[in-house]
Image: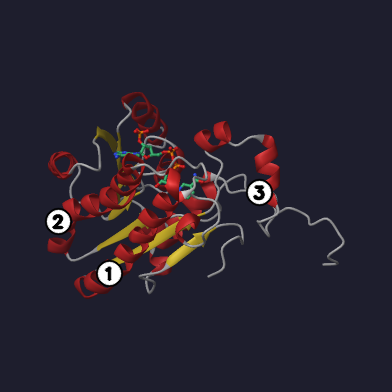
């Protein structure tokens, strides 16, 4: 392309192409399944015939997400739990295993950050603890709660959720970036440790994705300003993340473990 030309943005995706027959009938547990990337990924899995356990804290949002996935004709439940609390996750495990069985897929997506750039000196102790608790601690406690059943069965696929904020230092608050970098290293440790026991472990690392929350907080000016950093000419959509999740959960990626997949429109190249 002539660099003087205006780049043509890659069009927004309308639907997720592709079908992974091996996913049908499997059971996935998704934390953060009440909204945003978790809810979009749950819907994409439901369309592939995957059974679901959705986890979040907001009952109304969970109910709406549950209705959407059940409309695909699959078996699904929704359970309230704060994933930063190990005791709530133990109760969750008992309910899920009793009602649906041991998950084949574990997606600890719950988390997030304020999204606002914040100088290090302005980060309070509570901000720091909250970022680490709701991202790193919540991911680890979720994985740890469900691992015994998966290890006993000798198969499973874990998919963690990091962020571009953990890959490049460019805008995300340091506490969030550090917590998500912890999720990446946790992923690698588990991939090394659990591979010989039949489990794969990978990580998704999205950059800016337009969810209900980010659409509400990003001003049109800030959105326009961000676009220059994305070689593919647009911000992400939840379905971009869901499509990457389908690939990493299916047998199409059977010989892939321990990777961090940047779903980032070309913004992150590491
Ligand atoms: N959107 C992006 O641009 C982007 C980019 C990179 C990474 N991510 C990551 O992707 C994940 C989902 O983000 P999102 O944008 O979809 O955010 P979102 O729309 O705000 O949704 C966050 C989800 O996480 C759940 N959650 C948060 N803390 C929880 C806790 N302690 N226990 C249980 N559930 C909890 C929320 O549940 P309730 O609402 O029911 O409480 C909600 O379902 C997060 O880990 C985020 O860091 C997002």
Q: Circle 2 sits in a helix, a strand or a loop, which is it? A: helix
Mark before the other along the chain sequence, 3 or 1: 1
Crowd band around label 2 with a 10 angstrom C-alpha radius: few (<14), some (14–19), many (20+): some
Left-right relation of 96 to 253: left
- For image coordinates 70% across by 43% down, the residue present is 224
Label 1 secondary element: helix
- Gap between marks 2 and 3, in whole Å? 43 Å
* In this view, the mark in front (2 or 1): 1
Circle 1 residue: 189
Query: Residue 15 location, x and y as percent?
Result: 58, 46
> Can residue 161 be seen by looking at this rendering?
no
Residue 164 x/y as whole percent: 50, 57
Marks counted in the figure total 3
User: Disc 2 marks which residue?
Assistant: 149
Give the left or right position of residue 48, taking residue 90 as reference. right
Locate residue 252: give its quadrant.
bottom left
The front one of 94 and 83 is 83
Residue displayed at 44% across by 53% down: 174
Q: Is residue 215 above or below residue 201?
A: above
Q: Position of residue 116 (x, y in %)?
A: 51, 41
How far apart, in angstroms, are the residues tagged by discs 3 and 1?
A: 33 Å
Mark closer to the chain start, 2 or 3: 2
Left or right for 23, reference 99: right
In the picture as drawn, the residue positioned furthest to the top comes out as 60
Which residue position holds label 3? 226
Is residue 84 visible to the viewer in this orientation of the structure? yes
Q: Nearer the viewer, residue 216 or 151?
A: 216
Q: Find the distance from the CA under tag 2 to the CA under tag 1.
A: 19 Å
């Amino acid at each position: 392309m002539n660099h003087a030309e205006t780049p043509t943005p890659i069009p927004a995706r309308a639907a997720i192409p592709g079908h992974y027959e091996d996913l049908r009938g499997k059971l996935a547990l998704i934390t953060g399944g009440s909204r945003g990337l978790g809810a979009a990924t749950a819907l994409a899995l439901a369309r592939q015939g995957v059974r679901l356990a959705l986890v979040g804290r907001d009952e109304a949002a969970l109910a709406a997400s549950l209705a959407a996935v059940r409309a695909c004709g699959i078996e699904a439940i929704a359970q309230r739990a704060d994933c930063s609390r190990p005791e709530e996750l133990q109760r969750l495990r008992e309910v899920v295993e009793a009602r649906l069985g041991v998950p084949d897929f574990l997606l600890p997506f719950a988390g997030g950050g304020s999204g606002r750039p914040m100088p290090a000196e302005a980060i309070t102790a509570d901000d720091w603890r909250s970022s680490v608790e709701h991202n790193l601690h919540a991911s680890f406690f979720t994985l740890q709660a469900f691992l015994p059943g998966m290890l006993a069965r000798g198969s499973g696929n874990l998919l963690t959720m990091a962020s571009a904020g953990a890959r490049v230092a460019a805008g995300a608050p340091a506490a969030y970036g550090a917590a998500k970098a912890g999720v990446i290293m946790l992923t690698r440790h588990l991939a090394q440790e659990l591979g010989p026991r039949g489990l794969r472990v990978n990580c998704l690392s999205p950059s800016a994705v337009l969810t209900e929350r980010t659409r509400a907080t990003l001003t049109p000016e800030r959105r326009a300003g961000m676009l220059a950093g994305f070689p593919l000419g647009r911000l992400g959509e939840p379905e971009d993340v869901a499509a990457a999740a389908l690939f990493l959960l299916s047998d199409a990626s059977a010989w892939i473990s321990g990777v961090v997949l940047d779903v980032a429109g070309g913004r992150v190249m590491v």
